[in-house]
Amino acid sequence: MATLRIPRKYQSLIILFQFFLLIQTQLVLCYQYKVGDLNAWNIPSSANKDVYLKWSKNHLFKLGDSLLFLYPPSEDSVIQVTKQNYNSCNLKNPILYMNNGNSLFNITRPGEFYFTSGAEGHCEKLQKLHISIGGGNGTSYDEADSPALAPSPSYTNVFGSIPVQSSNSTSASSSGKVEMSVFAAVGLLFLSLFIGSTIL
């Protein structure tokens, strides 16, 4: 069996490349988000009626992530609906119906996703969620499509804590994309050097 012998001058490049690969794998992890960061998917309290709207705006979702809806299955459900049905709270003809109390929605494509409770009257009480997954071209949903966000006073959330992401979260995600591009460029450079040296 032949052994691949790497010239000494390229050994440090190989170690550097392996280091970049290790870092890159840490940057492409997917996350599972508990919807609203709440104990249950249910009707928001009057003190926190925009909980799902605020929650979705404070998270940057990406392909491969998933949404976990927790609720008592005998009392509620989750349906994925069209934008029109989301805005009008029409529960008929859902795209997807989930009712097991531990519903997981996997984000497998870019676009707009609209969810609401499948229980009558819950959508009208703002138990609904809209998320936007940007595509490769950086598209996202129009702010005009979402309800206006009125300023709210400080209050205790009866459902649980809602972590607020720092204002530089968007720039952090952009920086992650740049870092991944740099890693890819370094990897291609390494491969071209390595392949070039083995051919010569």
Image: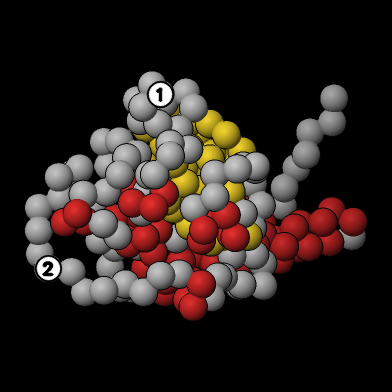
**Label 2 neighbour load within 10 Å: few <14, some 14-19, many 20+:** few
In the displayed structure image, the side of residue 33 where residue 104 appears, left or right: right
Secondary structure of the residue carrying tag 2 is: loop
- In the rendered image, residue 16, in percent from the top left (x then y), is placed at 55, 56
Q: Which colour scheme is used?
A: secondary structure
- Residue 4 visible, this angle: yes
Residue at 28% across, 68% down:
166
In the displayed structure image, the side of residue 103 where residue 84 appears, left or right: right
Label 1 amino acid?
Answer: Pro
The number of numbered discs placed on residues in the rendered structure image is: 2
Residue at 89% across, 60% down:
200
In the displayed structure image, the side of residue 152 where residue 57 appears, left or right: right
CA gap, disc 2 to disc 1? 32 Å
Residue at 85% across, 25% down:
1
- In the rendered image, residue 29, in percent from the top left (x then y), is placed at 50, 46
Q: Residue 153 carries which label?
A: 2
Label 2 amino acid?
Answer: Pro
Q: Mark 1 points at which residue?
A: 73
Q: In which quarter of the image is residue 71?
A: top left
Q: Which of marks 2 and 1 is nearer the N terminus?
A: 1
Which residue occupies the foreground of this view, 161 or 198?
161
- In the rendered image, residue 30, in percent from the top left (x then y), is placed at 50, 45
Indicate whether 26 appears above or below 143: above
- In the rendered image, residue 141, in percent from the top left (x then y), is placed at 55, 70
**Label 1 neighbour load within 10 Å: few <14, some 14-19, many 20+:** some
- Residue 61 visible, this angle: no
Q: In which quarter of the image is residue 149?
A: bottom left
Secondary structure of the residue carrying tag 1 is: loop
Residue at 64% across, 58% down:
110
Indicate whether 21 appears above or below 175: above
Indicate whether 168 appears above or below 25: below
Q: Residue 6 carries which label?
A: none
